[in-house]
Image (cartoon, rainbow, N blue to C red):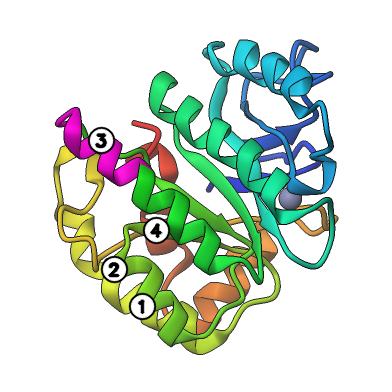
Amino acid sequence: MFNFHTHHIDEVPCLLNVDVQHWQESFPSHVALSVGLHPWNVSAGWQETFSLVRAAALDERVWAIGECGLDKVRGEALSLQIEAFRAQALLAEEVHKPLVLHCVKAYDELLEVRREVVLMCKQRSCCPQPWVLHGFRGGPEQAKQMMAKGFMFSFGHHYHVETLRYVFSSSVGTERLGNKGIPKDSTVSPFFLETDDSRLSVRQIYDQVARHLDVDVARLEHLCDPRQTIFR
Ligand SMILES: [Zn+2]
């Protein structure tokens, strides 16, 4: 069992999102870190904080860059958020680590940055790093569009049940895939489970998702373990 995105240390292995000021503190050995510049915290002079993120990104305890992304409802001007986000997307490529994404009503802009990164990777003949939309609450149609662009999802307590079922049905074939478990077919994608800033245990999320999908928790534990795929 793995908690893909949390702001509190979980009892099971987890990806703990820490503030860049705190990533050097000591954490239990079952805790991996994600460090990034949240769109709500982007302000003029973001480059200073970004230089701390860059230093953290090189550390082996930091498994992912994030959460980072774009938010049209909260935070500074979108143009500034895009600048800071682009820098982090490029950093993820540089250090070969996935991105944990926060996106609110800015999917077009997110896709635009994704296009830039994919193009850059094509020119360098390398594969873009996985981008995981955390706390995804979109509908199945949006999920389908994002999956076609190579995005993955992490679901928390609140999600669209039909989206969960759609992503699950698309991911079933990936359990047998090799190549770091990352599907070659970009319409097929595994997904992860998280508690985010809630005080729930991720076990509760696994139980809830297992009920919605009518599968055993054990099966989900395998399918939703990023250590089998993007963190291998
Ligand atoms: Zn979060």
Q: Are marks 2 and 1 in contact (CB under 8 Å)?
A: yes
* Secondary element type, mark 1: helix
Marking on residue 148: 2
Q: Kindly identify the amino acid type of the residue bearing the numbered disc 2.
A: Ala
Classed neighbour count for the residue bearing mark 2: other residues with Cα under 10 Å, few (<14), some (14–19), many (≥20): some
Q: Position of residue 4 (x, y in %)?
A: 58, 47
Q: Are marks 2 and 3 in contact (CB under 8 Å)?
A: no
Instruction: Answer left or right for 221 relative to 201.
Output: left
Q: Kindly identify the amino acid type of the residue bearing the numbered disc 1.
A: Lys
Q: Residue at x 30, y 45 (%)?
A: 118
Q: Which residue is mark 1?
A: 144
Quarter location, residue 219: bottom left
Q: Position of residue 120 (x, y in %)?
A: 29, 36
Q: Is residue 187 above or below residue 130?
A: below
Classed neighbour count for the residue bearing mark 4: other residues with Cα under 10 Å, few (<14), some (14–19), many (≥20): many
Q: Position of residue 83 (x, y in %)?
A: 62, 39
Q: Is mark 3 within 8 Å of ligand 1?
A: no
* Secondary element type, mark 3: helix
3D distance between C-alphas at marks 2 and 3: 17 Å
Q: Which corner quadrant holds the C terminus?
A: top left
3D distance between C-alphas at marks 1 and 4: 9 Å
Q: Which residue is mark 3?
A: 121
For residue 60: magenta?
no
3D distance between C-alphas at marks 1 and 3: 23 Å
